[in-house]
Image (cartoon, rainbow, N blue to C red):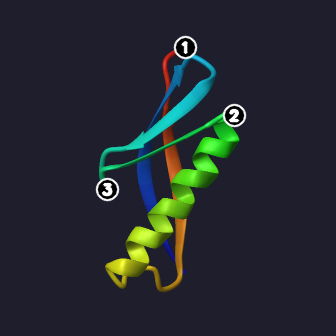
Amino acid sequence: MRELKVTVDIRQDNEWFVVVCEEYHLSAKGITIEDSLTELQRKLYEYLEDEQLSVNVSVIFVIKMPI
């Protein structure tokens, strides 16, 4: 299984957590950080399927967020 590392920026926008993946121009939001990352992972797998790149890929998030 291949590993795909993607950099993710996490920001809080009022009650939402917004995650942005610059490498694939994808973003997602959720009430919790976990919800937003789960949604981003779903979108990333959909993108990879469309590009026929999803064969045996494990996504690893490298997270950047302000303190």
Q: Secondary structure at mark 3?
A: loop
Gap between marks 1 and 3, in whole Å?
25 Å
Determine crowd level at label 3: few under 14, some 14-19, many 20+ residues with C-alpha closer than 10 A: few
Q: Secondary structure at mark 1?
A: loop
* Residue position for label 1: 67
* Marks 3 and 2, the one that precedes in the sequence: 3
Residue identified by numbered label 2 = 32
Q: Pick whichever, 62 or 37, lies toward us.
A: 37
Assign a secondary structure to mark 2.
Answer: loop
Instruction: Kindly indicate whether the residue at mark 3 contacts the one at mark 1 (C-beta within 8 angstroms).
Output: no
User: Where in the figure is residue 30, as x and y percent of width and height?
Assistant: 62, 38
* Residue where numbered disc 3 is placed: 24
Residue 12's place in the image compared with 28, above or below, is above
* Circle 2/circle 1 CB separation < 8 Å: no
Residues packed near mark 2 inside 10 Å, few (<14), some (14 to 19) or many (20 plus): some
Q: How far separated are the C-alphas under marks 3 and 2?
A: 22 Å
- The image quadrant of residue 52 is bottom left
Of callouts 2 and 1, which one flags the residue occurring earlier in the amino acid sequence? 2
Q: Earlier in the sequence, mark 1 or mark 3?
A: 3
Residue type pointed to by label 1: Ile
- Measuring 41% from the left and 40% from the top, which residue is drawn there? 20
Q: Residue at x 31, y 56 (%)?
A: 24
Q: Amino acid at mark 3?
A: Tyr
